[in-house]
Image (tube, helix red, strand yellow):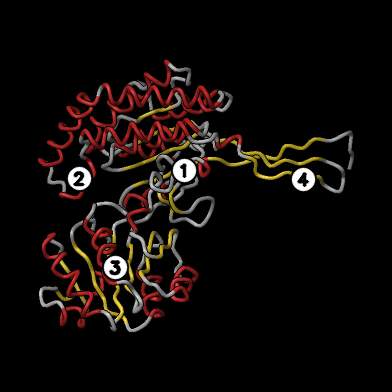
Amino acid sequence: MNDNNGTVLDLCRRARHAAQRLSQIDDNTRSAALQAAATRLRRDAALIEERNRKDLGAGRAGGLSAALLDRLLLSRERIESMAAGLEAVAELPDPLLEPIRSWQAPSGLDIEQRRIPIGVIGVIYESRPNVTADVAALCVKSGNAVVLKGGKEAIASNSIIADLLAEELCSAGVPEDAVQLIRSTERSDTQAMLEAEEFIDVIIPRGGPGLVRAVAQHSNIPVIKHYEGVCHVYVDSAADLAMAADIAFNAKVQRPGVCNAMENLLVHESVAEEFFATIGPRFEEAGVEIRGDDKTCTLLPGARQAVEDDWSREYLDLIVAVKVVSSLDEAIDFVNHYGSGHSDSIVTVDEVAADKFLDRVDSAVVYVNASTRFTDGFAFGFGAEVGISTNRLHARGPMGLRELTTYKYVVRGQGQLR
């Protein structure tokens, strides 16, 4: 179990030892431990809420934005979602039993590519204490130990969640050091974690672009980056405009402070006036500030004039940048230039246009006729997610169980010599 004693290096070393034992534990034990942990979170929901209120109070006193306070909040509904996420992960098939491929080489050797845990996963994250439970569940299920480093704004919430998880997991047969939380809020301890390459196999930062860049710059360990979500919805000339309005509204308003919320809305000039007549009042009623190009400001008099920096900003707030485009090609070029490679959507009934958008937009997740808000491990059926990778190597998009594995080759012979 976690404690406040010992150095960061001690925690990482213990996680490495736990990973070696965890990889040998059967899936039934790992899954039963997660089920027990889910029950414990529900049972102690009031305690979690109490600790979370301490973080919220400190955050308000410290001037955290409304978006960050929303990320920090653990309501009873969100605690239930955490517990349901643990159960959903527990019920998924064991990723370590999933076959990759096998073949016989010309030498007669039988070769199998077998999925195995990565080992020890290090996760550095901000604001959202539900990450503590989500990441722990995915790592335990996939046979990995995890070292967690949350932000100081969520230290009380993260600590109680980690304590409850560790106690239940250990009672159910998971090595007691498989889930480690670094309780210090000192930057020097974050750096110590990034230098623990002897014990941690990969670092996954979850947070703003400043955090991700700092981790990538200072880590001695390979980093799977999760940069900001500058996500787009493009309303095509052949869009169902009622559907487009619903999608754009959901993508911006349903939960604006998350990385898969829409930040830029692109609208084809042939439907702009009609579309704005629908979406404009809905945005206004919801309190959405519109920053538009010249054409948008002409058609939506309440819009502010956008500046160049607006097109590449992740607002994480009820602000949207809106541009009228003259063609599908212009929309695609705009997305690829200003987007962050996260999630982008086209609304259209034209299958040729949809296929062109899918083929040419260079993002981790590309949608046709759906909200970008679905870029999420739970929504994808992964139970939860470790993060949403904008990398090209190893993992891209929501990272679930499979993305927390690597592989080895198992070779069987009959005395072959080379």
Mark earlier in primary sequence (4, 3): 4
- The alpha-carbon separation of the residues under discs 3 and 1 comes to 30 Å
Residue 308 rendering spot, x and y as whole percentages = 25, 74
Residue depicted at 17% across the width and 75% down the height: 277
SS assignment at label 2: helix
**Circle 2 is placed at which residue position?**
70
Mark earlier in primary sequence (1, 2): 2
SS assignment at label 1: loop
- Where, by quadrant of the figure, is residue 152 drawn? top left
Q: Is residue 111 left or right of residue 294?
A: right
Residue 244 badge? 3
For the N terminus, the quadrant is top left
- The alpha-carbon separation of the residues under discs 4 and 1 comes to 27 Å
SS assignment at label 3: helix
Mark earlier in primary sequence (2, 3): 2
Residue contact between numbered discs 3 and 1, judged by CB atoms under 8 Å: no
Residue contact between numbered discs 4 and 1, judged by CB atoms under 8 Å: no
SS assignment at label 4: strand
Mark earlier in primary sequence (4, 1): 4
Task: Inspect the image, locate mark 4, and give the three-letter code of the amino acid beneath it.
Answer: Trp
- The alpha-carbon separation of the residues under discs 4 and 3 comes to 48 Å
Q: Nearer the viewer, mark 2 or mark 3?
A: 3
Residue 356 rendering spot, x and y as whole percentages = 47, 74
Residue depicted at 52% across the width and 24% down the height: 28
**Circle 4 is placed at which residue position?**
103
Residue depicted at 37% across the width and 69% down the height: 346
Is 48 rendered above or below residue 372? above
- The alpha-carbon separation of the residues under discs 2 and 3 comes to 27 Å
